[in-house]
């Protein structure tokens, strides 16, 4: 069992390096995608300050994103590819960082308290298989350092998960 240490988030590069180390240790030896997504969502949610939701959506046949493991309030279960921030990231195959979700055309308000969002696609062999979705009640909560850090975490969870 991993005893997660409290991390200092004031130095983002160091914070994400330490978070990546914790995630690698947490997922070591486990290949189940659902178990790894569940532990990843919990680790991110409890380690990153200022979040009100952290979780996964997985792309299913027909191009629909379906809710996976998460931490936070109940969420939208199905999101069409191309719809909302998650759907846009899945459609484009690139991370989408939104400073103010109310200014994002087609934003899906699963939790009215969310004001900013960061969605990182999970890419396996160049194909989107899902997304990591982070929401915050603080406008402008996420920046390029957060994006790079979460993209690294996405690579770790993809590397550990075999199914």
Image: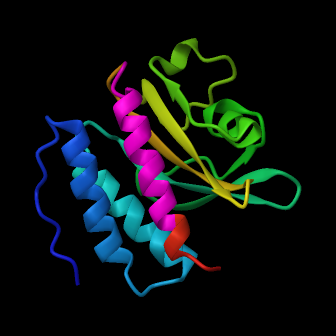
Is residue 122 or residue 110 the one in the foreground? 122
Residue 112 visible within the image: no
Residue 84, given in percent of the width and then of the height, sits at 67, 31
Is 24 drawn above or below residue 92 in the view shown?
A: below
**Main SS class of the magenta portion in the image:** helix
On the picture, is 98 further left or further right than 49? right
Q: Quadrant of residue 6?
A: bottom left
> Looking at the image, which residue is at 50% across and 59% down?
155
On the picture, is 91 further left or further right than 94? right
Is residue 109 or residue 59 the one in the foreground? 59
The quadrant of the picture occupied by the C terminus is bottom right
**Extreme top residue here?**
103
Residue 119, given in percent of the width and then of the height, sits at 54, 39
For the record, the magenta segment spans 140-157
Residue 98 visible within the image: yes
Q: Quadrant of residue 103?
A: top right
Question: Is 161 inside the magenta-drawn segment?
Answer: no
Is 11 drawn above or below residue 8 in the view shown?
A: above
């Amino acid at each position: 069992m991993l005893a997660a240490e409290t991390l200092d988030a004031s130095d983002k590069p160091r914070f994400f390096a330490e978070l990546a180390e914790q995630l690698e240790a947490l997922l070591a030896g486990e290949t189940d995608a659902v178990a790894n997504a569940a532990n990843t969502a919990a680790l991110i949610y409890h380690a990153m300050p200022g979040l009100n939701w952290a979780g996964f959506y997985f792309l299913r046949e027909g191009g629909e994103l379906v809710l996976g493991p998460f931490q936070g309030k109940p969420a939208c279960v199905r999101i069409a590819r191309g719809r909302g921030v998650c759907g846009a990231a899945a459609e484009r195959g690139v991370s989408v960082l939104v400073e103010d979700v109310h200014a994002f055309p087609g934003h899906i308000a699963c939790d009215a308290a969310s004001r900013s969002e960061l969605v990182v696609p999970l890419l396996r062999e160049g194909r989107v298989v899902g997304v990591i979705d982070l929401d915050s009640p603080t406008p402008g909560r996420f920046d390029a350092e957060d994006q790079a850090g979460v993209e690294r975490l996405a690579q770790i969870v993809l590397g550990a998960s075999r199914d």
